[in-house]
Image: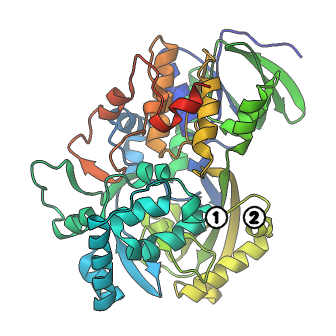
Amino acid sequence: MSPSSGNNVVIIGAGPAGLTAAYQLCKAGMSSIVLEKDDVVGGLSRTVRHGGFHFDIGGHRFFTKVKAVDDLWHEVLGQDFRRCQRLSRIYYRKKFFFYPLKPANALFNLGVWNAVWILLSYLKAQAFPGKLEESFEQWVSNRFGKRLYQIFFKTYTEKVWGIPCSEITAEWAAQRIKGLSLLTALTSAFMKGKNRDKGSTIKTLIDAFDYPRLGPGQMWETVARKVTQQGTELRLGTDVAAVLWKPNRVTGILTDTKGRSEEIEGSHFVSSMPIRDLLQRFVPAVPDSVLKAATSLNYRDFLTVALVIRQPDLFPDNWIYVHDPDVKLGRIQNFKNWSPDMVPDQHKTCLGLEYFCFEGDGLWSMSDRELIELGTRELDILGLAKASDVEDGAVVRMQKAYPVYDSGYVEALGIVRGFTDRIENLQLVGRNGMHKYNNQDHSMLTAMLAVKNILGGTHDLWGVNADQDYHEEVTGNEGSDHDLQRAASTQPKVPRRLEKSALH
């Protein structure tokens, strides 16, 4: 094997972060090599095709407050973007609750007395909040009240993560639902379409978003085509076998493409692969304490069961959260309601049933046929479709879909960062690359800043989405470069709870 040229930017991963980095480098007149272990691009934001039907791996709204990201989306797809009106509901106790909250609907479904108890529980939490906020359970209960937490948060959250809410850190809640409280939701519901008082930055919860005509994969397939046309080398089906390094610097990547090995040298390296896997592949091995910390970082896996149903209209929602503990199903996407072009026959509907699992557990190990039968049966139990109307199905499994914010992740990530921050030509980007539950736009923003650093900048990628406003709130900063400016820093920043462990 002969090493390739060392004057390369090597990008690991062809998801939103990796391809954004390649795209920005092309705009700066620089080529790169993109390594992707799968045979398709897009990562979790891919779109799968089955019998002419298109379906996502989960739902992917294109909504952002970062103008640079929004500009890139529209620059790439142009007229292939469509405006989509949001409708999502919670399925709980055989009834549907609108989300965001609509008071009349919630009151009718819960009943007056239950609603009164929820309000009293909320008022109690406001008057006598818990002093500790270390867990998701404590964080949410302080803002919504214990009773609403138990009804709307506990069952679904534990279904998603596979661990008790008491073991999920408050950091996850703060990052994903920061700024939202029962009062915010009620105010938004009662004052929809009106501006709030002058002192508040929050106007309303978003009720519309953009979406590619043929799903999010259309975006990343288009980006991949554009960058390869401009000289970027995209290698699919290529795994990272080893990361070669010496103190403070990565020197190359040893790749495995269907049994063929090659060493790729580079001047800069950008990685979006799971940080645990990345550090386990370092040769020579990283220090034992770093390897132990990286290995302790956990992930939640995910699978989608797509079902084709002989009915033109089943329900109006884009997606439904399933809080019913009697089924394993976590969420349902109705792809025709995202874009009619996703479904080639308008007399039929394609649903994506989402199951959260761990690789190797009972759900993950079920055969495709068994999973299609399970999804069909649970749809029938929920009353959303008749089993007899299901005519076809497909299954897609996704490893490491969600980085887990368990009780040990803060210390472990701090140790990992203490090591990776010293490697001058390696930048970590994206959700799994940073073990950070970023949305697509924040993953893209980390990649944009990484490219700016390659060009001579000193931006702190870890500052992205560290203290953002709630990701579904429209604020007075919408459409500005607010996030980009806030993330820029001439001095590396370490989140307060990471500071001690990151420096040792």
Q: Looking at the figure, which quarter contains the C terminus?
A: top right
Whichever of callouts 1 and 2 sits on the residue coming sooner in the sequence is 1
- As measured in the structure, the alpha-carbon distance from the residue carrying label 1 to the one carrying label 2 is 13 Å
Color style of the picture: rainbow
Residue 253 drawn above or below residue 236 = above
Which mark is on residue 206? none
Q: Quadrant of residue 275?
A: top right
Which amino acid lies under the numbered mark 2 shown in the image of this protein? Trp
Any mark on residue 162, and which? Answer: 1
Quick check: 374 left or right of 94? Answer: right
Name which quarter of the figure residue 228 lies in: top right
**Which residue shows up at 83% across the image and 31% down it?**
256
Is residue 242 something one can see in this rendering?
no
Q: Secondary structure at mark 1?
A: loop
Q: Position of residue 64 (x, y in %)?
A: 36, 44
Residue 242: image location, x then y, percent:
80, 27
Q: Residues within 10 Å of mark 1 (few under 14, many from 20)?
A: some
Residue type at mark 1? Gly
Residue at the spot 54% in from the left edge and 31% down from the top edge: 500
Q: Secondary structure at mark 2?
A: helix
- 295 and 92: which one is in front? 295
Between residue 471 and residue 373, name the one nearer to us.
Answer: 471
Residue 61, placed above or below residue 480: below
**Label 2 CA crowd tier, 10 Å (few <14, some 14–19, many 20+):** many
Residue at which label 2 appears:
364
